Image (cartoon, rainbow, N blue to C red):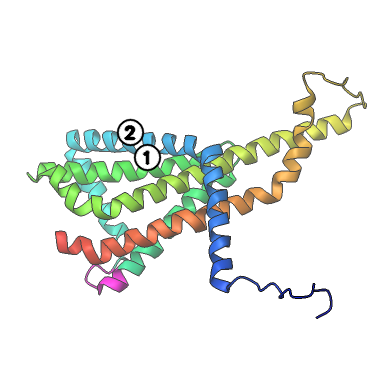
Amino acid sequence: MIGLEPGSAPQEKPPLFKRAADLVRGLYRDEWTMWNAHYKRYFGIAAWALALGFIIGFVYFAIRPEQEKKAFAFFIRSLRDIPLGASPLVLAMTLFYHNARAAAAAAAFGIIPFARLSILYPLANGAALGLVASISKRQGLNVPLLFLKIVAPHGVFELPAFLYATSVGLYLSISLGKKALAARRKKKEDRAPLTPAPTGAPGGFLDSYPERAEADRGTLWADVFQSFLLVVLPLLLVAAFVEGFITPLLG
């Protein structure tokens, strides 16, 4: 064969499965880098917001039983589209759809620069858990045991998924805010007379930021979508199947 040394064999492409596995491993390596560089700090903030929401919700509804009843009625109405009496598979897929939609909203709230509105989601989820704990305690139930049997099995997957989605939203909000500031600064510089900064001046890093931000514009949305696809959705899918198939057996 032309181009091959005598006695050599043509190199075969690796099997499709191996190439797909290598691609997935590479994507998760990139995601691990994003976690360490950006999401980890926001995940901690989101976790504190969840805990704060739980404490506020539990204390508030414990001392305001009339508001507890109203909040619980609203909570029940929000679950009206979930077929609790359906088959485990239908229940699991419905839960996955609802949770994925809520997590997407938590991440999408990050499109407002610097607003950090995504943090409202762990606060609201914490308050909802506080409401459940307050109602259970008022009914004389064992709250820790109840949470261990009903919430923990799927919550160990669902809560991290929502916290991760919140982290993605916070990262997006901060990043878009920085890009907006960079664009505003660049616009001012374009209007001002050109006065090049001396080499090695302290402002060199900041002066180069608009160009770097512009170069990063396309990768920001790709990172956000990849994070949601690789981490949030798989966790929510596992949580939904646990809640649909296992949790009813523990109640």
**Amino acid found under the numbered disc labelled 1:** Leu
- Residue 88 forms part of the magenta stretch: yes
| Highlighted magenta segment, given as a residue range | 83-91
In-image side of 41 versus 202 (left or right): left
Q: Is residue 175 above or below residue 149?
A: above
231 left or right of 187 in image: left
Please check the rendered image and state whether residue 131 is part of the magenta-colored stretch, yes or no: no
Residue 95 percent coordinates (x, y): 34, 63
Query: Residue, x 29% and y 46% (percent of image)?
Result: 128
Looking at marks 2 and 1 on the same chain, the residue that comes earlier in the sequence is marked by 2
Of residue 99 and residue 204, the one placed in the foreground of this image is 204
What is the x, y in percent for residue 92?
A: 32, 67
Q: Few, some or many C-alpha atoms within 10 Å of disc 2 (few <14, some 14-19, many ≥20)?
A: some
Q: Nearer the viewer, residue 154 or 132?
A: 154
Q: Residue at x 83, y 20 (%)?
A: 200
User: Can you say which quadrant of the picture contains the N terminus?
Assistant: bottom right
Residue at coordinates 64% horizontally, 41% vertically from top-left?
Answer: 176
Is 53 left or right of 185, judged from the image as shown? left
Q: Quadrant of residue 19?
A: bottom right
The Cα atoms of the two marked residues, 2 and 1, are separated by: 7 Å
In the picture, which quadrant includes the C terminus?
A: bottom left
Q: Residues within 10 Å of mark 1 (few under 14, many from 20)?
A: many
Q: Which residue is mark 2?
A: 52
Residue 33 location, quadrant:
top right
How far across and how far down the image is residue 186, in percent?
80, 34
Amino acid type, mark 2: Leu
Q: Element at badge 2? A: helix
Identify the element where label 1 is drawn: helix
Q: Residue at x 87, y 22 (%)?
A: 197
Left or right: where 7 falls relative to 251: right
Above or below: residue 228 compared with residue 64: below
Query: Which residue is label 1 attached to?
Result: 123
